[in-house]
Image (tube, rainbow, N blue to C red):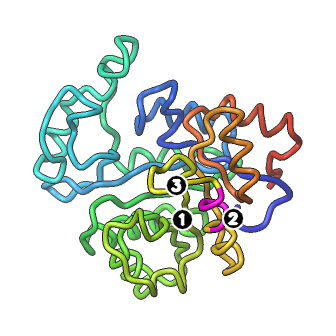
Amino acid sequence: MWGKHDGIQLTAHRGIKGLIPENTIPSFRAALDLGVDVLEYDVHMSRDRELAIMHDSTVDRTTDGSGAINFMTLMEIKQLDAGIKFSEEYRGLRVPTLRETLELFSSYDYSPCQIVEIKDFRPEVVDAVVAMLEEYGLIERTVIEAGDAPTILYLQDNYPAIRTLVFPPMSMKRLYPEVYERVWGVAVSIVSRAFKSGEQIRALCDEFAAAGKELFLFCGDNAEQIEQCIEYGAANITTNFAPFAIEYLAGRGLRARG
């Protein structure tokens, strides 16, 4: 579960996106089969108000289709191939819904946690996501993330029991400083071009840690990046290559044990 651990937790970024098409059921299943601490994925709402799992606002990058996901029906989204652009091996994969993802997630009895990043900032999307999390009894095991201050403030005001996660000020779409007062954690990219040096990242991480915020650093995809995350005080490291990251942290004696 969330909170203090005797090691560093690992988050599987959109599943194992470095090895399997991102934000797909096989990618999620592979991560959960490894026993990752946290699964992370992204949510949009379709034109017919269904919750679909996709990072981008359009389907162009990860499927054989094109267009804004908010302007497509779920039936149209389900006709897209979400694997073919990754490799021929994954031809025929479909974009999952939030319900399909939660069905899979809740079937694992080791009680993993999850980060649900809301990419569509309309209040009705937030309400729909929270309602489904409540239906599955997953509020306690979920952190909701958004790069938009009004969305986080809406969550904090209307659903105070939910843990929230934001990005540093330079990475927010819309920024209100008060969002950091009640937020539970902050996700900091160690490879962002917004930072001019490692010292700048360290100073920001120190500031958030001193304020009592949980530090989520990303992405730790190789030994050098993982060591950077450790150096900056990560409570949680997000990775695109969960098999490597699990083995590496375990080898360093730093893997969280619940």
Q: Which residue is mark 3?
A: 196
Indicate left or right for 211 with 77 as reference.
Answer: right
Measure the alpha-carbon separation of dots 1 and 3: 29 Å
- SS under mark 2: loop
Q: Nearer the viewer, residue 55 or 106?
A: 55
Tell which circle, 2 or 3, labels the residue nearer the N-terminal end.
2
Q: Are marks 1 and 2 in contact (CB under 8 Å)?
A: yes
Q: Which mark is residue 143?
A: 1
Does 21 lie within the magenta span?
Answer: no
Q: Which residue is mark 2?
A: 2
- SS under mark 1: strand
Amino acid carrying mark 2 in the image: Trp
Locate the N terminus and report the quarter of the image it occupies.
Answer: bottom right
Measure the alpha-carbon separation of dots 1 and 2: 9 Å
Q: Quadrant of residue 49?
A: bottom left
- SS under mark 3: loop
The residue sitting at 57% across, 50% down in the picture is: 190
Measure the alpha-carbon separation of dots 2 and 3: 31 Å
